[in-house]
Amino acid sequence: MSSLVVVGAQWGDEGKGKLVDYLTSNADLVIRFQGGNNAGHTLNVDGVETKLRLIPSGILHDGTQCLIGAGVVFNSEVLLSEMGQLADVGKKVDPSRIVLDRDAHLILPYHEAIDMAREERRGKDKIGTTGRGIGPTYEDRANRSGVRAAELLKLDELRVKLEKTIEEKNLYLRTVLESERQVTWDEVWGVVERAAERLVPHLGNVSLMLHEARLAEKRIVFEGAQGTLLDQMHGTVPFVTSSNTISGAVLTGCGTGPRSIDHILGVAKAYCTRVGSGPFPTELEDATGDFLREKGGEFGTVTGRPRRCGWFDAVAMKRAVRLNGIDSLAITKLDVLSGVEKLQICINYHLNGEKVDDVPSLASDLESVEPEYLTFDGWEADLTQARKWHHLPQEARFYLSTLSEIVGCPISVVSVGPERQSTLFSSGGNFIRNFLV
């Protein structure tokens, strides 16, 4: 058995979907372990673009079984729509192919209503939530009032539970949030009935399936959503998501032990991006930032919102390497940097004139840090046709080797384009190479 965790090492949108698609070419199982449909992965294969929000990115490989772990909160309407779109292009999406953990929690219309009402109430202090109901669903999971997928098997019991819940949620919307948003019984129950009708055949015990896969020595990929710096506990609070995005969430999100993980691959862009509000020390609010956004196509898969762009942040990356126990890095979108005359990497933060040894805990402090940079010569060459490490210009290889040395983590993979073949391996990428064989 060989297992690999693919986790975002920045603020999300690092290109994990492309890497998972590539790495699952010879995998038996791929498991999404946290998050919901607030995060999207875009795959480009043979010129065809596929956008996924809940189904793991290994779905395009017919021999790979796709599992959605208990750590995921799922919108059944989105999941069914995604399955339908895949079926329309000839992909097999039956219960033998897609398994939803029985303990995953269901997002319902009142979760979305609460999410949007809260953001509206914040006014200028919005945190940038997508309004998909992710946070309120995780809250219900924490206070033991959520709806698990297994409850779709017993609709009579669920009906009694939801009658009381809907009344409480509408009261909260009306009196606490002072919102005109309300949800109806028919609206909520319609979602539940469609989910029960279509998704019950897909329910399974992901923890047990993983245990049996390990005993059978199968190859497993764990797929994360979003990124380390958005982790609910260790990220740039309060501008974070509502789940744990770091590699440790694999254990709780899938119901498996730490010895089931063989390698942790952190994915990071060759620069940084962030969507929505929150501190961003290396942000470029100038022509270079605009260049990176346009050339890199930096617009959200789910929301379409333009991403903020900035220089690579090695201080934040050191934190990501430590929090995840990253064994090696995959650097994506290196090709986007072609044509930038001078490149920079942030190597230190200074706060109130003093160097700080880690990303500050408080958002107000992170907003105030002054980044210290190393400057590099850029390159003009188009990298999109490079297929071997030595095809990269000397300046690009120097940029990568210095980045690796600063963050204290080897780089095993570099991506120079959205297609599968635009993936290069370094001499230190032996685990990844062997995983693909």
Image (spheres, rainbow, N blue to C red):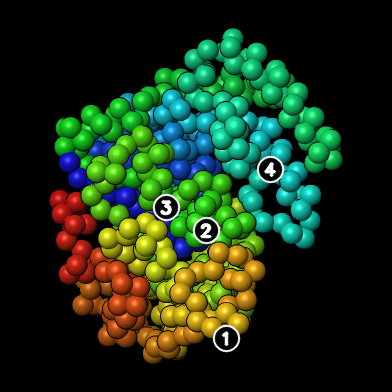
Name the kind of residue labelled 3 in the image: Ile
Tell whether label 3 touches label 4 (CB within 8 Å).
Answer: no
Q: In this rendering, which labeled residue sits more in front, label 4 or label 3? A: 3
Q: Which residue is mark 4?
A: 115
Question: Which residue is label 2 attached to?
Answer: 235
Mark 1 or mark 4, earlier in chain = 4
- In space, the residues marked 4 and 3 are separated at their CA atoms by 23 Å
For residue 242, the mark is none
Residue in view at x 19 percent, y 67 percent: 428
Q: Which residue is mark 3?
A: 246
In the image shown, does 421 or 37 lie closer to the viewer?
37
The location of residue 244, given as percent across then percent down, is 48, 48
How much space separates mark 1 and mark 2, taking CA atoms?
24 Å
Q: Do we see residue 90 in this rendering? A: no
Between disc 1 and disc 3, the foreground one is: 1
Query: Which of the two labelled residues, at mark 4 and mark 3, occupies the earlier sequence position?
Result: 4
Three-letter amino acid code of the residue under disc 4: Asp
